[in-house]
Image (cartoon, rainbow, N blue to C red):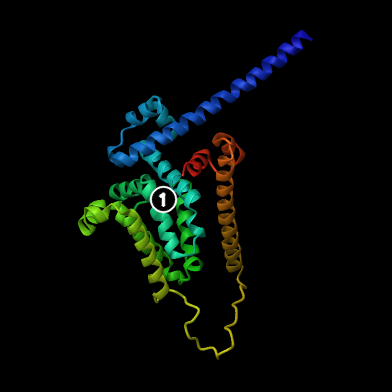
Amino acid sequence: MTTSRSAATSSSGDTASGDAPTKRSDATRQALLRAARDEFAEYGLAGARVDRIAEAAGVNKERIYGLFGSKDKLFDVIIVETLQEFMAIVNPLAETDPGRYVAKLFDYHNSNPQLMRLMLWEALHRGDDAHDVDGWRAHHYEAKFERASSQFGVSKEDGGRVLLALCGLSNWNLAVPQTVRMLLGPEAATDKTATRDFMAKFARAAMTSSDLVVRQDIPSDEPAGEPAPVKELTDPVDRAAERLRTAQLAVDAAREQLADALRAANAEGAGANQLARQVSGTLSRPVVLKLLAD
């Protein structure tokens, strides 16, 4: 019996010690990602130094190469993870009002400038060569393009350019503060709320009156009082795409509800780490912590 208990104790100890390296590895990876994001946002791809990242994360730089392979590949991972965090927090695909869309993007980038800095550094170093990780970025932008038509009531041909215009309204003035200061003057340049509100109103007005918008009151060839027939989706691809769009809307709404529930639970005393464990597999721990911090 003594031998059996000893064996059981030994087995339990082995299991616990087996879990510990995994937890340490996860913690190390997260520390490296945080340090790398700060470094790349500050210095760009060319100026960032692996030894500074390693020092900030408390590891040796060989560990970085072991986990990510190279500085370039680490930068690719940082871009994708920062974009994923942005999507989880802002949930832009769910917003159908162009004014609120611009305002939400403005607020996020004003409070979290690292994503914009990373994207600008990438453009400076790589031009239009956007590296991808497991195809996530390609899928991300394809989903945004596909969603734009129904999201803002524009043709599919104009969807991408509409997104570029709205992102420009929300982001560009934050990317070039020196230009904002010269155009508006020192005092007005610091009034971010006024700029945000103007850009939101401008977006809403432009989309309301624009010829790009598929408006419901545009005259058609149909006789008055007879609505245009609803196009039946007979093509399997069209039907599947429509089901996916519907599912994405449901996911976006559920994600927003989850974020609200997390904030409410945290306000009532639930710890951030506890909540992160509860939603493990749905939202990553950094995203949960970011949601609760905002």
> Within 10 angstroms of label 1, few (less than 14), some, or many (20 or more) residues?
some
Say if 18 sits above or below 100 in the image. above
Give the number of callouts.
1
Answer with left or right where residue 39 lies relative to residue 148.
left
Q: Nearer the viewer, residue 180 or 156?
A: 180
- According to the image, label 1 marks what residue? 108
Horizontal and vertical percent for residue 131? 39, 48
Q: Is residue 69 visible?
A: no
Give me the residue at 46% from left, 34% from top: 30
Horizontal and vertical percent for residue 273? 55, 34
Answer with left or right where residue 167 lies relative to residue 7.
left
Q: Which of 29 and 99 is in front in this view?
A: 99
Answer with left or right where residue 7 lies relative to residue 220.
right
Horizontal and vertical percent for residue 292? 50, 42
Looking at the picture, which amino acid does disc 1 mark?
Tyr
Give me the residue at 57% from left, 60% from top: 249
Say if 99 sits above or below 126 in the image. below
Q: Looking at the figure, which quarter contains the N terminus?
A: top right
Q: Can residue 99 be seen in this view?
A: yes
Say if 128 sits above or below 263 in the image. below
Residue extending furthest right?
Answer: 1
Horizontal and vertical percent for residue 181? 23, 54
| Helix, strand or loop under label 1 | helix
